[in-house]
Amino acid sequence: MKKTIIAVMSFLACAVGHAQNPYLPLWEHLPDGEPRVFEDPDHPGQYRAYIIGSHDMTYTAYCGNDVRMWSAPVSDLSQWRDEGPIFSHYVNGQWDTMYAPDLVETTDRRTGKRTYWLYPHSRGWGRVAMVCKGDRPNGPFTPVNLTADGTRCVDGSLIDFDPSVFVERIDNPRDADYARGYRAYVFYGFRHSTAFELNPDNMYGVRPGTQVHDYFLPASERYGVVRDPEGTQYPALCRGQNPGDFNFFEASSIRQVGNKYVMVFSGYSGPDYGLSSTNSALRYAYGDSPLGPWRSGGVLVDSRGVVPNENGSHLTTTNFAHNTHGSLQQINGQWYVFYHRAPRGFGNARQPMVAPVKIECDKRSVAQGGKVRIVAYDPYAKNHEWTAAAADGNVYTGAEVTSEGFQIFGLNPYQKYSAGIACYVNGNNWMQDNFDNWDNNMDLAGITNGGVVGFKYFGFGGLAHDTKGVKAFAGTAKGDHTMLNLQLTPGGHGSVRIHVMLDGPYANETWKGREIAVIDIPADARQERATYSVPVPAVEGLKGKHALYLVTEGADLRPTPLDRNPYNRSPKPQRPQGLFDLHSLEFTKAGMACTIDEKPIVKITVDGHEVALPTQPQFATNANGIMDLGHYQAYAPLHEGSTIRATASNPAVKIAVGKVVDGRAVVTCTYKGAKRVYKIN
């Protein structure tokens, strides 16, 4: 067991420069992210942003064997570092699956000691309520409420699905908890909301003298329909508050904002702004204390990407629906909502997303009419607010789904971007999954006639100074001779015209988009990856940030039949056929060449014969304990005297060939800090 843990833990990746959405590498699948800011234990006085989540690593089910953590310095929110699997649990020959976790810090005023409490949400039988503690944000963590054999939680462990913990700092000397310095509360539940004050002596049980608050927030089966038993009373709600306004589903998380408390949760939304009901949204409530009473605040973010439709008559969606989970966190004075998306609606390959929000909180108590108002933040908009409104009167005020991530002043235009950061996609099957830790790309495959692919936003106006964790960058200037370069593969179905639109996909009163270029793909174009370039002088000298849309015109094709799973869609690769596949886009200027970014190819021979290497890594099971995308299984006849040779197409790949032992050997290849281990037997 110890050898297995050491092998798994060795796959830590180096820091990556990445700030757009998704804000972690496109091969990393970290859903259920809980954001925190803690002091860097290795650099006192400096702070890091941490994201703690589950880990979609099986490809056939939710989550995986580990709680995963990434972190970045708050001074540069593009430098995310993989902290690795910070916790896993092995018992009775199996690894537990870990669902949505939480992590909090307590500081004992009497001793000054900081302790980090991890709530890993193990799905092992009898271990859902597991709680762990450690001395650093990234562990190691030790369970505090398991029996000696590690098989179940001790009596008094009640915490259940999607735990969220709030630590309340106590600064009033008259408060009974002043000497300790804090109180703590836990919130949890799936289609049923529960909360209680934690026993501060163990951080897992109910505090003596307090009670469990069951049916804490009203739960719903769909928007506006309460699923709790008829006649259920809700003492945690403000007087006169309609229980049908909350729509709780799962994913509790709580934060303090000013003198109030905000509860974030996955909640059914959509009909309140004219769309179908979905749990792909986060909602929020606000109150005067961690235990309420609460008022409904509305939708925080709908991960489906709500915008007006083509003519502005109604609102529509531009992204994929499945589920979502996340919270609020303030970093560098800016509030963000964290959530996740599921490309092509495939729930076993979810990715972390982030968007800025504006929070207004008055000083009146909620009981006296005080409110917390949360809307999408745009640094260039009037009042710094973005909304989506339709002619039918429906208005969406939640966070905007963009390609920006932390790059809230717009993406640096003079960089290369994968098609996988698209935030407006009207083809639900185009976006392809990626589990290759040497290739930070995701294709949009099979784009069809009328297809719209949008990227919001590019910072053509640049950023003069480092701001809010975003590094300064130059925009586009008059005379740059700016070119737009699309890397794509023609589909072989006749000629294709791609209309490059600025600010909107449609040139009408609703969207006010304008065509700035056209890219033509001839009918006889080879069906191979190529770069198509076109001048775009219209982007030179623009102020602020602007959206870019690619609108496809070509032959109508019969849709590709795709397998479907009624819940998570098919785990089989979904590669539809269409007019073209889009790989990446990049702006360049005079004297600037397109970025060459080719994935290294490894070749292994055994006794002069080439070994067939798999294209996909091994995925996690509860038996194999895999927690990283670096394990590949290959087969070849080996004996003690076999000669194994390995080469790579890129000399930057470092290769180590192990000895043959019992008919098995290992070849380790490292590229930019990311390891691949080819196990040959």
Image (spheres, rainbow, N blue to C red):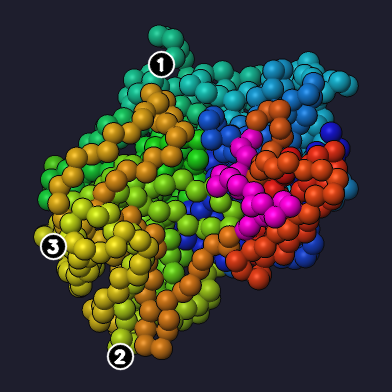
Residue underneath mark 2: 479
Judge whether 138 appears above or below 530 on screen. Answer: above
Q: Quadrant of the N terminus?
A: top right
In the image, farthest residue toward the front = 608
Residue at image location 77% in from the left, 43% down from the top: 638
- Mark 1 — residue? 227
Binning the other alpha carbons within 10 Å of mark 2 as few (below 14), some (14 to 19) or many (20 upward) gives: few
Q: Secondary structure at mark 2?
A: loop
Magenta residue span: 602-620
Q: Nearer the viewer, mark 2 or mark 1?
A: 2
Which residue extends farthest top? 230
Q: Is residue 192 left or right of residue 271?
A: right
Magenta highlight: main SS: loop
Dot 2 or dot 3, earlier in sequence: 2
Residue 66, given in percent of the width and then of the height, sits at 68, 38
Please check the rendered image and state whether residue 616 is part of the magenta-colored stretch, yes or no.
yes
